[in-house]
Image: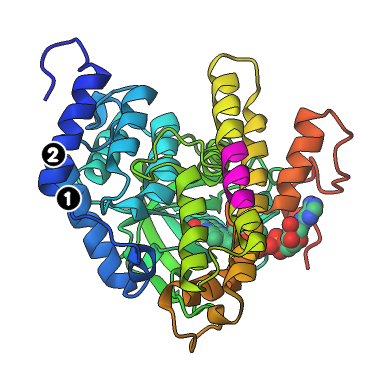
Amino acid sequence: MTTGEAPESVEAFRARARAWLAETMPRLGTMSHVARYADEDGSWRRARELQQKLYAGGFAGIRFPKAYGGLGLGPAHQLAFNEESAGYELPILLNIPTFSVCCATLLDWGTEEQKREHIGAAIRGEEVLAQFLSEPSGGSDLAGLITRAERHGDEWVINGAKTWSTSAYGADYALCLARTDPSRPKHDGLTMFLMPTNAPGLTMNRIRMVDGSTEFCEEFFDDVRLPADAVVGEVNGGWKVVTRQLHHERSAMGGGSPYTSGEGMPRSKSAMEAIEVARAAGRTDDPEVRTLVGEALALALVHEQLVARVSEGLANGHLEGPAITMPRLFHAETSQAENDLGLRIAGALATVGSGPDPFARQVGTSFLNRQVISLGGGSTEMARNVISERLLGMPREHAPDRGVPFHRITRG
Ligand SMILES: Cc1cc2nc3c(=O)[nH]c(=O)nc-3n(C[C@H](O)[C@H](O)[C@H](O)COP(=O)(O)OP(=O)(O)OC[C@H]3O[C@@H](n4cnc5c(N)ncnc54)[C@H](O)[C@@H]3O)c2cc1C
C-alpha cells in the first residue's frame, strides 16, 4: 500500500494489482455471465465476499476519497485496474446502483456522518444500497410521486409504495424520495431519506420478470418510522438530491461513471461475446456473421470514444451536466443492436429454455430483456427530452402542473 502523501504511481499500482489479482481472485470462465444470474441470492453474498477481498487487498473504492474509506486515486489508476482485472471474478453487481449511483449521491449530498458510515461500509463490502424512486403510478414523472413523509416529533413517518427497485432484496439501505410538503409545487416539496430495507412497516416483494429473474422488487410502506438524521440533503430539497442521483445513474448507464470498477473493456466484451455465440453456432466462417461481429466491435468502439469524449468535456467544463445523457442514450441503442445481432448469429440455438448450447441460450434470454436498457435509469424518451431541451435549446415540453401546489394538481 501507498504510504505518506504521494499517491502510488500508476505503473506501481498496475503491477501490484496484476500480482494480487493473479494470487487472490478467481478467474472467470467463458460462461461466467450465465452463471452470475443462476442463483440471485448467492450472487449477492458472493459480491459482498469479493468486495471484502478487494478491500483487504487495498483495491476497493479506487476513486472515492480517502476520508470515506476509498483510495483517493484518479482515472488512470482506475483504468489500469479495469484492464488488469479483465478475466477475473469481481463484485460488479455492486457497481450499479451501490457505488456509481447511491454512494456518488451521498458524496454530493450526504452529511459527514452519512458519508463516513455508508460509503465506508459499502467499500468494505459490508453494505449494499438500492434506490426507492419509481412508484406504481409512474417513474418518468418522478416529481409527481405520491409517497408521503410526515414529521411526527423527532421522527418521519413514511406511507406509500415504490416499485422496480433493482436488487433491493440484497440491499441494506435505500435512497427513498418522498413528498414532505404537498402545499408546494411538485418539485419543491420532496425530501430524500436513507431508509433501512429491514425497517418495521416495510414490506418487500420480488417481481418475476419474463426472463425468469426476480431482481426487481416492490415495497409498501405502512408507517415506516425514520429518525431525523435519515434525511439526505435538506428537507423539501429532495429534487436537488435526486437530480444529482439521476445524473450519476445516467452516467453509470452510459458507461461513464468514475465509481464503477473492474468491468474490463466494453470493446472486447461485446465483440468477444458475439464471437463466442458464432462459435457455438458453428458460423465463424460465415461472411454475414463476420460482418455482424465487426458491427459489434465498431459499435463498442464508438461507444467507448463517446464516453471518453463526454467525460473529458464534463471534466474540463466544455460540456454541461446534461451531456451525460448522450452516452446513456447511445448505450441503450448499442445494447439493443448487440442483442439483435447476437440473436441473428445464434439463430434457432437461442431458443429460450430448450436450446442445446447454454451460451447461445443466454442470447435468447438477454433478448427477452432487450427493452430494460431503454427504461432503467430513466427512459430513452426522457433522455431525448433532456438532450433536446437542455443541450439543443429546443422549447420545453408543456407542463400544466408547473408551479402549481401539488395538492391542487388533478391526478389519475
Ligand atoms: C433495468 C431497470 C432498472 C430499474 N431500477 C430502478 C431502481 O433501482 N429504482 C427505481 O426507483 N426505479 C427503477 N427502475 C424504474 C425506471 O426508473 C422506470 O421504469 C422509468 O423511469 C420509467 O418509468 P415507468 O416504467 O413508470 O414508465 P412511465 O413513466 O409510465 O412511462 C411509460 C412510457 O411513456 C414514456 N413517457 C413518459 N413520459 C414521457 C414524456 N414526458 N415524454 C416522452 N415520453 C414519455 C416513457 O418514456 C415510457 O416509454 C428501473 C427500470 C429498469 C428497466
Whole-percent x, y for residue 358 in the image: 42, 77
87 and 204: which is toward the camera? 87
User: On residue 25, which mark appears?
Assistant: 1
Contact between marks 2 and 1 (CB within 8 A): the answer is yes
Whole-percent x, y for residue 87 in the image: 30, 50
Mark yes or no: residue 209 visible.
Answer: yes
Upstream in the sequence, badge 2 or badge 1?
2
Amino acid on which disc 2 is placed: Trp
Tell me the quarter of the picture where residue 188 sits.
Answer: top right
Mark 1 Cα within 10 Å, few/some/many (few <14, many 20+)?
some
Q: Is residue 184 left or right of residue 315?
A: right
Residue 247 among magenta residues: no
Dominant SS type (magenta): helix
Q: Which residue corresponds to the image point at 87% horizontal and 48% vertical from the top-left?
A: 400
Highlighted magenta segment, given as a residue range: 294-303
Query: Mark 2 highlights which residue?
Result: 20
Whole-percent x, y for residue 374 in the image: 65, 57
In the depicted structure, whether residue 18 falls above or below residue 206? above
In the depicted structure, whether residue 398 falls above or below residue 275? above
Model colouring: rainbow
Q: Which residue corresponds to the image point at 54% horizontal and 55% vertical from the top-left?
A: 133
Amino acid on which disc 1 is placed: Met
Determine whether the residue tagged by mark 2 lies in a helix, strand or loop.
helix
In the depicted structure, whether residue 350 falls above or below residue 153? below
Mark yes or no: residue 176 visible.
Answer: no
User: On residue 156, which mark appears?
Assistant: none
Counting labels gives 2
User: Which image quarter has ligand 1?
Assistant: bottom right
Say which quadrant the C terminus sits in: bottom right
Say which quadrant the N terminus sits in: top left
Tell me the quarter of the picture where residue 79 sits.
Answer: top left
